[in-house]
Amino acid sequence: MEIAKDLFIAVLPVFIILGVFWFFRKDGNQLGIYRADYLKVMKAQNENLERIAKALEHKNGTDVK
């Protein structure tokens, strides 16, 4: 009985930590939505940078890559 009690006390913090992580976990689908939004923002930023590069190229008459 003493061994079972010691084992329970040793394993209890692990279950508490896992329970906290499970309780506060993000929804997997929600993370996918965040990733999709991030990709949209990065694509828009890339398009803006390309537009700026073309404008500078046109203004300076040089090739900006």
Image: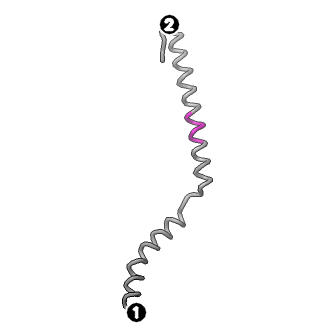
* Residue 27 locus on image (x, y percent): 59, 57
Q: Residues within 10 Å of mark 1 (few under 14, many from 20)?
A: few
What residue is shown at x 60% (from left), y 42% (from top)?
A: 37
Question: Does residue 60 lie above or below 44 as drawn?
Answer: above
Question: Does residue 50 lie above or below 25 as drawn?
Answer: above
Is 6 on the left or on the right of 30, as rendered? left
Q: Nearer the viewer, residue 10 or 37?
A: 10
Q: Residues within 10 Å of mark 2 (few under 14, many from 20)?
A: few
Tag 2 secondary structure: loop
What residue is shown at x 58% (from left), y 47% (from top)?
A: 34
Is 9 on the left or on the right of 33, as rendered? left
| Residue numbers of the magenta segment | 37-42
Is 6 on the left or on the right of 36, as rendered? left
* Residue 42 locus on image (x, y percent): 55, 35
Q: Name the residue tied to disc 2.
A: 61
* Residue 19 locus on image (x, y percent): 50, 70
Task: Decide which of tag 2 and tag 1 comes sooner along the chain.
Answer: 1
Q: If the image is split into quadrants, where does the N terminus sit?
A: bottom left
Q: Is residue 41 magenta?
A: yes
Spatial distance from mark 2 to mark 1, Cα to Cα?
A: 85 Å
Amino acid found under the numbered disc labelled 2? Gly
Question: Does residue 57 lie above or below 41 as drawn?
Answer: above
The answer to whether mark 2 and mark 1 are in CB contact below 8 A is no
* Residue 47 locus on image (x, y percent): 58, 26
Q: Name the residue tied to disc 1.
A: 1
Q: Main secondary structure of the magenta part?
A: helix
When asked about the image quadrant of residue 4, the answer is bottom left
When asked about the image quadrant of residue 50, the answer is top right
Q: Nearer the viewer, residue 18 or 57?
A: 18
Tag 1 secondary structure: loop
Q: Is residue 2 magenta?
A: no
